[in-house]
């Protein structure tokens, strides 16, 4: 099973504050889910592949599950009905 972690649940450009570093705001949709629940937003970004590779490298070789990423793309993210682990 994929690891689960705290995910923002609504990670998009309007919830990113840029200063000395990037900060996510608006955590009301916080949930436990696989990282792909937040990473899906970068799937079609012009620099998406570089962002996903950087995430994997920063996480010591975490392998992005592209099928799960695509699931969240089709679903429109994790916001609508919680993580895939909720019944």
Image (cartoon, grey):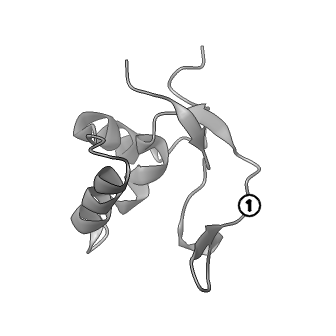
Residue at the (56%, 58%) spot, across then down: 11
Residue at the (27%, 37%) spot, across then down: 65
**Residue 36 placement: quadrant:** top left
Give how far across and how far down residue 32 sits, in percent: 60, 32
34 displayed left or right of 65: right
**Residue 63 placement: quadrant:** top left
Residue at the (33%, 42%) spot, across then down: 69
Of residues 74 and 58, the one drawn nearer to the viewer in this rendering: 58
Residue at the (63%, 70%) spot, across then down: 23
Q: Quadrant of the C terminus?
A: top right
Give how far across and how far down residue 81 sits, in percent: 61, 32
66 displayed left or right of 9: left
Which residue has dot 1 on it? 26
- Residue 9 against residue 20 in the figure, above or below: above
Give how far across and how far down residue 3 sits, in percent: 44, 27
Q: Residue furthest front?
A: 60
5 displayed left or right of 71: right
How crowded pointer 1 is (Cα within 10 Å; few <14, some 14-19, many 20+) is rated as few
Q: How many marks?
A: 1
Q: Secondary structure at mark 1?
A: loop
Q: Quadrant of the N terminus?
A: top left
């Amino acid at each position: 099973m994929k690891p689960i972690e705290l995910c923002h649940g609504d990670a998009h450009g309007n919830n990113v504050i840029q200063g000395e570093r990037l900060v996510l705001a608006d955590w009301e949709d916080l949930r436990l889910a696989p990282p792909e629940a937040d990473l899906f937003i970068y799937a079609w970004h012009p620099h998406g592949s570089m962002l996903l590779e950087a995430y994997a490298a920063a996480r010591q070789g975490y392998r992005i599950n592209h099928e799960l990423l695509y699931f969240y793309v089709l679903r429109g993210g994790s916001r609508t009905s919680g993580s895939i682990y909720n019944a």
